[in-house]
Image (cartoon, helix red, strand yellow):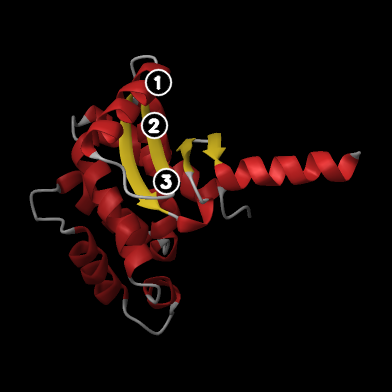
Amino acid sequence: MNEGLIPRRYAKALYEFASEKGDSKSVYGLMQSLASAYVAESSLQSVMSNPFIAAADKVKLLVTATGAEKGDKVFNDFISLLTANKRLDMSREIALAYLDIYRKANNIYLVEVVTASELSNDDESRLKALIQKHLNGGTMEYSSRVDRELIGGFVVNIGSERLDASISNELKQLRLNLLSK
């Protein structure tokens, strides 16, 4: 069966259940923590897929990774469902699908700005304001990083959109133009 379809269905069911309970935002935070845990600890996926590790230990690991508490009933019920259906190994994909569903439902955009050098606070504020205008009332989850290979300028990624205003891109385009003639 399609590995992408199953996590998406679980994530959709979780989102609908969490929304009914008025808990979708806190589950969103827990899913962000879970996705971050998978990035921070690369061996987590192999542990979750290992059939020789007890399901109870996997549950403890997921709860610890997310920082979930006993009061997070929706999340704990969901983990129980995954355990009962032997789907704990799909928790990463389900978390990513939930994040995607929540962001679409709440008009949240992932925004990444890559610059050749550190931006001043004023420049970063102006850039954030320009991006915010482009989002048509949506909100953004903003992150930035420095990539010296850009030489100068910046790259803005908003979901699947990309604005590349870097010098390295301009040089690449110039090179392609010259080669095509």
| Mark 2 and mark 1: Cα distance apart in space | 8 Å
Between discs 3 and 2, the one toward the N terminus: 2
What residue is drawn where x is 25% and y is 55%? Answer: 33
What residue is drawn where x is 73% and y is 41%? Answer: 174
Q: Are marks 2 and 1 in contact (CB under 8 Å)?
A: yes
Residue that carries the numbered disc 2 in the rendered image = 109
Residue that carries the numbered disc 3 in the rendered image = 115
| Mark 3 and mark 2: Cα distance apart in space | 19 Å
The disc placed on residue 148 is none
Depth check: 48 or 131 in front? 131
Mark nearer the viewer, 3 or 1: 3
In the image: residue 72, left or right of residue 133: left
| Tag 2: amino acid | Tyr
Depth check: 126 or 161 in front? 126
Depth check: 9 or 105 in front? 105
| Tag 3: amino acid | Thr
Q: Which quarter of the figure is the N terminus placed in?
A: bottom right
| Mark 3 and mark 1: Cα distance apart in space | 20 Å
What residue is drawn where x is 31% and y is 37%? Answer: 141
Q: Position of residue 102 (x, y in %)?
A: 35, 34
Q: Is residue 163 above or below residue 32?
A: above
Most extreme residue toward the right is 181
What SS does tag 2 mark? strand
What crowding class fits label 3: few (fewer than 14 Cα within 10 Å), some (14-19), or many (20 or more)?
many
What residue is drawn where x is 21% and y is 70%? Answer: 60
Between discs 3 and 1, the one toward the N terminus: 3
Mark nearer the viewer, 3 or 2: 3
Residue that carries the numbered disc 1 in the rendered image = 135
